[in-house]
Amino acid sequence: MVEHRSIDMSTQQAHHDARQLAADSSAARRQRHVPLDEAQLLETQRAFDSVAADYDGPRGNNELIQRMRLTLWDTVHSELPPNARLLDLGCGTGIDALEFARRGFHVVATDWSPQMVERTQARAAACGLQSRVTATHLGVQQLDQLDGSFDGIYSNFGPLNCAPDLQDVANECARLLKPGGKLVFSVMGRICPWEVGHYTLRGRFKRAGVRATRGATAVGMNRHTIWTYYYMPREFFRAFAGDFSLQSYRALSLFMPPPYLVDYYRRRRRWCERLGRLDDRFGNLPLLRDMGDHFLIVMRKR
Ligand SMILES: C[S@@+](CC[C@H](N)C(=O)[O-])C[C@H]1O[C@@H](n2cnc3c(N)ncnc32)[C@H](O)[C@@H]1O
């Protein structure tokens, strides 16, 4: 998972440069909608390459992440017919792709991090499921290079928050998806009450408000930078509205703490499980569904 913490770079100068870059580029983007540049995309790629080896551990797949994963798995499973052909955008180490392969789907898994793609390929080989999972090094900004026709496209835990131009992604999804096909995405939202409370109580006010940033913001992970856009669900949907109808959306981890507070969860497991049940029950209600660590959105191609 992306660690939601302030930029953590090795020298003061780098720190200052990155802040300056973030401020400059977000101001420019506000005025001219400038997408991320090549250098920023490569920074994000290096960040994920650097954690690929241990991404199945607490950073990328702890109990709280697994809980959210189940919601996406069940949603894809219920929205798409058996044997459907799926495209995974930002597959990471391939946990979702292999789960769907085991459930009988065929998956083309793509990611901008070559190390993540290697992990997916190794996972498919280890499970003997190469015939159902093809892993390809491809960024969401390069979908024009992909051919084929899919029944469903999914993306889990925020790869689309790193897309330099969401409208381009929407257009490519429309090209790649059959009529009636489904999009199932989990995306980092703008309003995460746990995050605001957690950092405000610690006096880290800037960090508490990071999701309010307009345009791309620099988020630190493993001494690298991930260039991240945060969205409200309706704001996200606007990019897709030309070719897709909005079927549903719901909050993920609104009452339950976000994944980086897994230590809190482990200390208060029973209490947190109750909170998780509140998510399951009320996470799709108006207003509540606009909040949470992530939101899960389902769209249908017209
Ligand atoms: C938080 S991880 C989630 C990985 C995986 N979907 C999962 O559920 O474990 C985000 C993933 O997005 C990928 N990513 C970041 N920027 C991307 C881009 N521009 N295009 C495609 N993938 C990207 C990263 O390499 C990383 O694997």
Image (tube, rainbow, N blue to C red):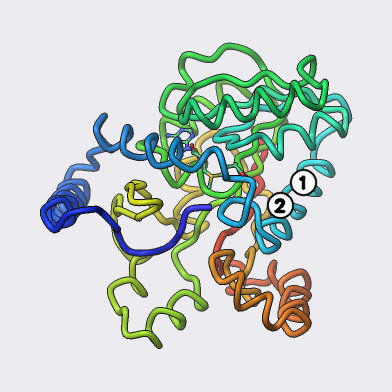
Give left or right: position of 83 versus 244.
Answer: right
Seen from the viewer's position, the closer of residues 32 and 113 is 113
Q: Which residue occupies 59% across, 38% down? A: 244
- Is the C terminus in the top left, top right, bottom left or bottom right quadrant? top right
To which quarter of the image does residue 184 belong?
top right
SS type, badge 1: helix
Quickly name the residue at label 2.
69
Give left or right: position of 16 versus 213.
Answer: left
Seen from the viewer's position, the closer of residues 179 and 46 is 46
Q: Which residue occupies 61% across, 57% down? A: 58
Q: How many marks?
A: 2
SS type, badge 2: helix
Q: Which mark is residue 159?
A: none
Asked whether mark 2 lies closer than 8 Å to ligand 1, one says yes
**Where residue 68 sits in the image (x, y, percent)?**
69, 58
**Position above or below: 270 against 53:** below
Give left or right: position of 200 versus 293.
Answer: left
The amino acid beneath tag 2 is Arg
The amino acid beneath tag 1 is Trp
Quickly name the residue at label 1.
73
